[in-house]
Amino acid sequence: MTDIPATADSSAADSPAPQPTPEVTYEVREGVARITLAAPGRRNALSVEMSHEIIEAARTAEADPAVGAIVITGGPHFCSGAVREVLAAAGKDPAEDRAYRNLETIYRAFTSIGEIGLPTIAAVRGAAVGAGLNLALATDLRVVSTTARLLPGFAQIGIHPGGGHFTLLSRAGGREAAAAMGVFGEEIDGARAVQLGMAWAAVDDDQVESEAHRLAARVGRDPDLARRLVANFRRQTAGGGLPWDVAVEMERPSQMWSLRRR
C-alpha cells in the first residue's frame, strides 16, 4: 500500500478540539466568590450549559473553606430569562426526557444559588427577567441599579411562571407585589424594588458590583461564622406559605401546559 503523505487537513484532524468559551466566570477576593454570567450577546439568558456552570461555581464556592460569601452578577445585563430553545423544546413535548431535564437544569441554576450554604448577594444591573428574576430573588440580599428592570415576563410571552416564581416574589416583596408582578405583569425599577423590600440598596449603575462586594466582604472574611449566620438566618426568617421546593413542583404542570399550547 502506498503511503499517503499527511495533509494539512489530516494534521488538523489530530489537533485537540477547541474548548467552548465559558459562559460563567469565577474569582475569589477577600473571602467573596464572584460568579459572573458571561454571555452578553444574549443578555445572559440561561442556557443549559450556563446553568451547569452556575451550579458548579456555587458548589466550588461552598467547598472552599476560604469563601464566606457569594456575589452573583451579570455585568451590564443581569439575566434575560431562559434561552428560548429550552422553552420551545419543552413546549413540543414537556414529558420528553431531555426537554424535561434541560428545563430542570435551568431551575437548578437558581435553586442551587438559593440553597447553597453561604450568604449570597445578587448585584443587578440591566434587566432581570423571568428565570433571571428568579435567580436574583433566590439570593439572600439584592443590590440593584436604580435603573434596573425587574419583571416576570412569563405572561407577556404566553407562558405560566415556573421555578417557584410566586413563592420567591411573595417572600421578597409580599403578596401585593407578587400579585402585581406575577399575575398582572408589572415591571419595577431598582428604586421601587427597595421601596417594596425586594432589594436592600439601589445605587448608580457603576457602583452596583462594588457595593455588593463591600457588603459580602464584611461577612466573607470569616467564612465559618458566615456559614453559621446564614443557616440560622434562613431557618428563622422562613415565611409561611409553600416551601420553595414544593412551589417549584406545583408550578411545573401549569408551565408545561402553557409551553405545550404555544
Image (cartoon, grey):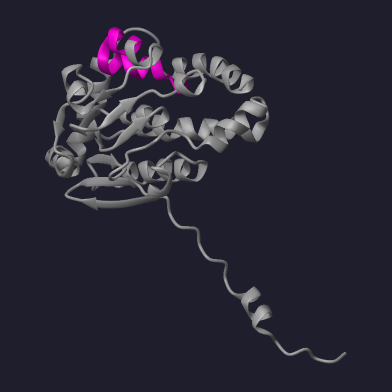
What x and y, as percent, mark residue 24?
38, 49
Residue 224 highlighted magenta (yes or no): no
What secondary structure do most residues of the magenta stretch adopt?
helix
Residue 138 vs residue 261, the one in the foreground: 261
The residue at 38%/23% (across/down) is 152
Q: Is residue 38 left or right of residue 89?
A: left
Say how many tags the image has.
0
Q: Is residue 191 left or right of residue 250?
A: left
- Residue 27 in sight: yes
The quadrant of the image that shows the C terminus is top right
Residue 19 vs residue 187, the one in the foreground: 187
What x and y, as percent, mark residue 146?
18, 31
The answer to which image quadrant residue 258 occupies is: top right
Vertical position of residue 176 compared to residue 202: above or below: above
Residue 102 vs residue 223, the one in the foreground: 102
What x and y, as percent, mark residue 57?
37, 45
What x and y, as percent, mark residue 49?
50, 45
Vertical position of residue 130 compared to residue 207: above or below: above
The answer to which image quadrant residue 111 occupies is: top left
The answer to which image quadrant residue 200 occupies is: top left
- Residue 115 in sight: no
The quadrant of the image that shows the N terminus is bottom right
**Stretch of the chain drawn in magenta:** 161-179
Determine the residue located farthest toward the front in the rendered image. Answer: 156
Residue 163 highlighted magenta (yes or no): yes
The residue at 32%/51% (across/down) is 26
